[in-house]
Image: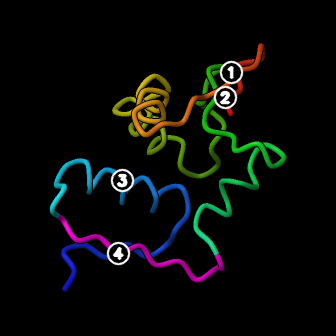
């Protein structure tokens, strides 16, 4: 018996599963991915370096959904992303141009 089923093991699905367990540790979470492993799309970003975010500004880089993206980044921005990564044991590396891997 599950409490939460997440379909898709990409960055959003992985983040949702982690947040669910952090919020409610007793929650029984299943993460389903059709490919042979989770996180495959994230691994492909940044020429295989796992592009996590960019400090150089994210606005205006989204086609068709920039208003929605702006609302999302206002609620969970770059600093929130970096803090989350560090909390789960990922040490981000930032380059001079603001790209964070």
Where 74 sits versus 38, above or below? above
User: Which type of secondary structure does the marked residue at label 2 adopt?
Assistant: strand
Write the residue at 25% across / 73% down: 4
Give the Cα separation between the discs numbered 4 and 3: 11 Å
Magenta stretch prevailing secondary structure: loop
Q: Which residue lies furthest to the top in this view?
A: 96
Percent across and percent down for residue 43 are 71, 54
> Which residues fall within the magenta stretch?
27-36
Crowd rating for badge 4 (residues with CA inside 10 Å; few <14, some 14–19, many 20+)? some
What number is the disc on residue 18?
A: 3
Q: Is residue 35 magenta?
A: yes
Question: Do the CB atoms of the residues marked 3 and 2 lie less than 8 Å apart?
Answer: no
- The residue nearer to you, when weighing 67 against 12, is 12
Q: What residue did someone put label 2 on?
A: 100
Give the Cα separation between the discs numbered 4 and 2: 29 Å
Q: Quadrant of residue 76?
A: top left
Where 38 sits versus 72, above or below? below
Q: What residue did someone put label 1 on?
A: 94
Write the residue at 20% across / 49% down: 23
Give the Cα separation between the discs numbered 3 and 2: 20 Å
In primary-sequence order, the first of circles 4 and 2 is 4
In primary-sequence order, the first of circles 3 and 2 is 3
What number is the disc on residue 30?
A: 4
Q: Which of marks 3 and 2 is in front?
A: 3
In the displayed structure, does residue 50 sit left or right of residue 7? Answer: right
In primary-sequence order, the first of circles 4 and 3 is 3
């Amino acid at each position: 018996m599950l409490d939460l089923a997440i379909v898709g093991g990409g960055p959003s699905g992985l983040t949702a599963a982690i947040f669910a367990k952090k919020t409610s540790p007793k929650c029984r979470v299943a993460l389903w991915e059709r490919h042979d492993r989770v996180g495959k799309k994230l691994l492909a970003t940044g020429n295989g370096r796992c592009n996590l975010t960019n400090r150089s500004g994210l606005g205006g880089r989204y086609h068709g959904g920039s208003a929605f993206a702006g609302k999302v980044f206002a609620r969970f921005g770059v600093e929130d992303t970096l803090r989350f990564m560090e909390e789960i044991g990922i040490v981000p590396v930032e380059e001079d141009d603001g790209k964070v891997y």
